[in-house]
Amino acid sequence: MTSKSSFLVSMKENSKRRLWVWIVSALAFMLVFPALTALTINGIIRAGRQVAESYGNTIAGEIIHERLINNVIRMVGMNTGMLLLSSAIAVISAVQGFSYLYSRKKIDFYMGMPVKRKKRFLVIWLNGILLYVIPYLAGLAISLLIAAGNGAVDRSVFVNAAAAAVANSILYLGVYHMAILALMMTGNIVVTGFAFLTFCLYEFLVRMVSQGYKQMFFRYFSYYGSDRMPVLSPFTMYINLSSRFSYTNRLDAKYLIGMLVFAAALGMLSYICYLKRPAEAAGRAMTFGITKPFVKVLLVVPAALFMGGVIADVLDFNPELSMEGIGWMIFAMALAVLLGSGVIQVIYEFDIKGCLHKISHIVISAALVALIFIAFRYDLFGYDSYIPSQNQIKSIAFVPDYYEEPAYGGAHFDGSGNYVSSYEYARKNMYLHNIEEICDMAEQSMKAYNQVDWYANDDTYDQRGTWVYVNILYRLKNGREVWRSLWVDVEDAHTVETLDKIVGTEEFKKGFFMGASDSLTAMLDNKEGKYKISTSYGNRIYQQKMSDAQAKEFLAIYQKDLALANFSNVRENTPVGMLSFSITEELNGSVYLSGGVMSRATRSWDVGVYIYPFYKDSIAYLKENGYYMDAQVKLEDIAKIQVVNYNYDAAKALQEERLATAGASAIGMDDPAVLLEMGAAGKYDTEIDARVYADYTQEEQIRELAECIYPNDLVVDDWDCGKKLDRNYQVIVYFKTDSEMTKNYGTDAWYGFLEGQVPAFVMEDTAYKE
Amino acid sequence: MIEIRNVTKSYDRIRAVDNVSVTIKENTVFGLIGTNGAGKSTVLRMLAGVLEPEKGEIAIDGLPVFDNMEAKKNIYFIADEPYFFANSNAMDMQKYLRSIYPEFAAEDFNNYLVNFGLDKKRKINTYSKGMKKQLALICGVCSNAKYLLCDETFDGLDPVMRQGIKSIFASEMERRGMTPVIASHNLRELEDICDHVGLLHKGGVLLSKDLEDMKCNIQKVQCVFKTIEDEAKVISALDIMKNEKRGSLNVLTVRGNKAEILAIFATVNTIFFEALPLSLEEIFISETEVVGYDIKKLILG
């Protein structure tokens, strides 16, 4: 057993051997870090004198205090600079501590001494941790003292500093162990460097290759659930932890424990490698000969596939269209296998002549690359036709792409009040159990979609259906989550029937519409919470504030009415208005003077809830409380309505005519194929302007127009392919100069006509005439 | 006692030590002889617990040595290129070794430094190669470890220093039973210092014998016989390893103890007879020739 005093003596002796690392660490953390904090504080105080001259001492004091707090938090909290510095010190410390393993001379000396291997490891390991922790904590304490001396400390500073101390230390531990493991598996510094980079980037490379190939070859691949960011990386874990902290102001236990477990696992692995490491490994490329072929093949295979992917990108390779370019991809992959294997073998042997040794490794790598490529190309594992069997599925989340999300109002919050994406929201909240219907629809839709020849150059375009994109999460009973994308034809009667059943369920609404959750009511109730919430009703042009009490009442009524909504009735109707929630979070930091009022920097989100004509109770409430509008614009406010018809069809015809008579150069395009493709995609050369303007000031015309125009923000061309504005027309409403709108909103607002509802006189007035 | 039993060690499929068995008795100076690549350093590194044998056992006073502190605290290993901490001086090394070897003789260390003319404040990286070897030996001796393993440590030492080291070894052996194990590729380096010699060749042990035994068992005589019959009689009666004839003078290397050989010579008439001292080199030549090796090619170059 190691005696305490002998251990301390060993620690002291080891510290002497790594004095320069202690000095570097101490300089960085105990000198540069506090100095930068002091300089930052000094800069703010000096700038504060100007603030005091401008705003007076009382206001300036508050502004300066906020700035100081904010900047001190930036310095002492989790930040990129500390991530980089901690990682750099971790790598230096690991390499310096264990680099004796590279040298036979040093190994003979150290390992000849009567010191147990585990004690030597423990001494070096612990010393490597202390040389970070002590200077860092000391530097942090000095920085906080400097901040306190300048009145730049409050509870939030301490919370951030404490969180950063924990997170940075665990990050250090993870990177330190990763560097030690790289060192234990290799025999010289250069190869250790490669190994460390491999540990850092390997998962990212594999994920990128996997995602790239799935995207290239599988039409039902869903980006969601396919993150490129590595999971097994202390850096990613730190970034996730830091980002989570910035929202919640507390360290997320899940991420923290994950980081700790990962660091501990790396440490344990390093220790085992240390115990198993033979002394004769000094100077070799790889410590354990048995790992050589595995490492080589595991590096070469994804690297070759990556090269193939790069070439595919360069050549715009699209297997759905043609296989043109596949030869170049195969050539690039073969070349990468040869070069990769050769380079690694040269590193293994430290001999350029080694590049052609171990042909068997080249053959195995090439075979694996070919196998993986073929597996993607011919979908050997049935990825693109996979629908889990119904009895395996526990529940499903059905996440349409951009559905019922107003242009300003698509935010989602989780149960803890943290902002999340709509996909993450659905993942956490949507548990559909009409499994049979969804699976059948998925199967039928995939079958039908696969039969459509999207690249056929014929006149069947209009018969191909209207396909929209949706992501489906199958939650399996074994705990696995499977994400797939799906295209569904919203013109197909059977599909629409199924979509009605899906969208009509309470589970879908709870899991997709923020307005259906209890979170908004909770925010309205919690006045002391971190979010300030304000509510209004209107169409984004005419808006009326709603009190919190009314907002809660109305929300409750809306949630009952929402039960009436399904895919078809939402699709067939146009909203009469929108309930808007503006959610604001005040941030620590710069306080500024705006219009004589002190304001604070904020972060804002909007949640919008469409009100449809069939929400009878909601409309009744709006009418009862004076929020409801019969039309989308009030006649008494209107001075003039101007309609602009872009006449896209006429522009296209004109373009084709010019192309036929004068050639591509006449309209600024030199490639007719590109031009035709643009035309098919509905893009037109801007030089061909077929716009026609019409101004309406007569009361009768204005009355007729006012009844059929909708604000641009209210009618969104979204997933259900329902009612949409005619893209040929733009309607500009000019308000009277003495109207409330001009005073409060602006002189004009942009509207549009619904498709098929353009008044005849407007069509006539704005038709294109040569 | 150090016991090496059937020890084998390979590097990347190259067998450096092949089934070696040697016993090193306490309080003797054991010389490990061999050409470059014979496996001397590998044997010493295994003895020091730096390398782990693939097969076989190494026991120091009955204890396995690899990663065993009880065994290793009795060992001090001086590698062929001794390592000293970067920018350190002799006193830094002393402090470190005192933390490792509880019985480190600090006073002796200082005295030896003075006696060998080594400046204790001077940085070791400014020492000459020979001075570094001296310092390594002083460190080893002062560690008070029972077994001092020296890998090519005497190469490059001048005769005065060698003599100094020899006398230190002698006094330490007498005082505390120190057992030096000295590896060298040069037979002449060990001639005047070893009690027991092991000869390694291509990873295996050619022989391991006590030097005195070898000396007692091989005799070298030069003589002139009175008659051809006398000569024939003696030659047929002796176990002659080598016979060089220069005119009428016979120089014979003969296996057997001295008394028996003298008794045989007493039965014939000689004009001239003289028993000659044998060098270690000559003993080795004779011994290895018996087993079919040409030692001159192996060690003497």
Image: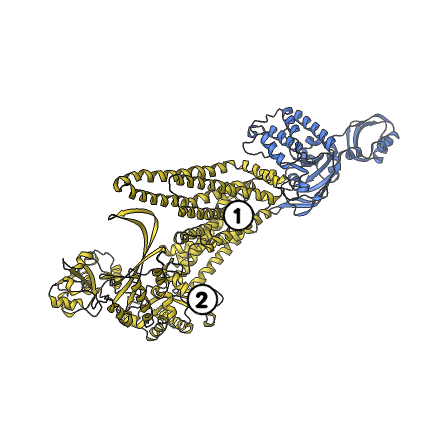
Chain colours: A yellow, B blue
Q: Are marks 2 and 1 on the same chain?
A: yes
**Relative height, residue A435 to residue A184 (above, below):** below
Quarter occupied by the N terminus of chain B: top right
- Foreground residue among A112 and A415: A415
Q: Which one is in front in this view, the residue at disc 2 or the one at disc 1?
A: 2
Kind of residue at badge 1: Leu
The image quadrant that residue B167 belongs to is: top right
Determine if residue A187 is in view. Answer: yes
- Residue at image x 63%, y 24%? B114
**Relative height, residue A134 to residue A412 (above, below):** above
Kind of residue at badge 2: Arg
Judging by the rendered image, the residue that carries numbered circle 2 is: A475
Percent position of residue A88, x then y: 46, 43
**Relative height, residue A755 to residue B199 (above, below):** below
Percent position of residue B41, x then y: 64, 39
Circle 2 — which element?
Answer: strand
Judging by the rendered image, the residue that carries numbered circle 1 is: A181
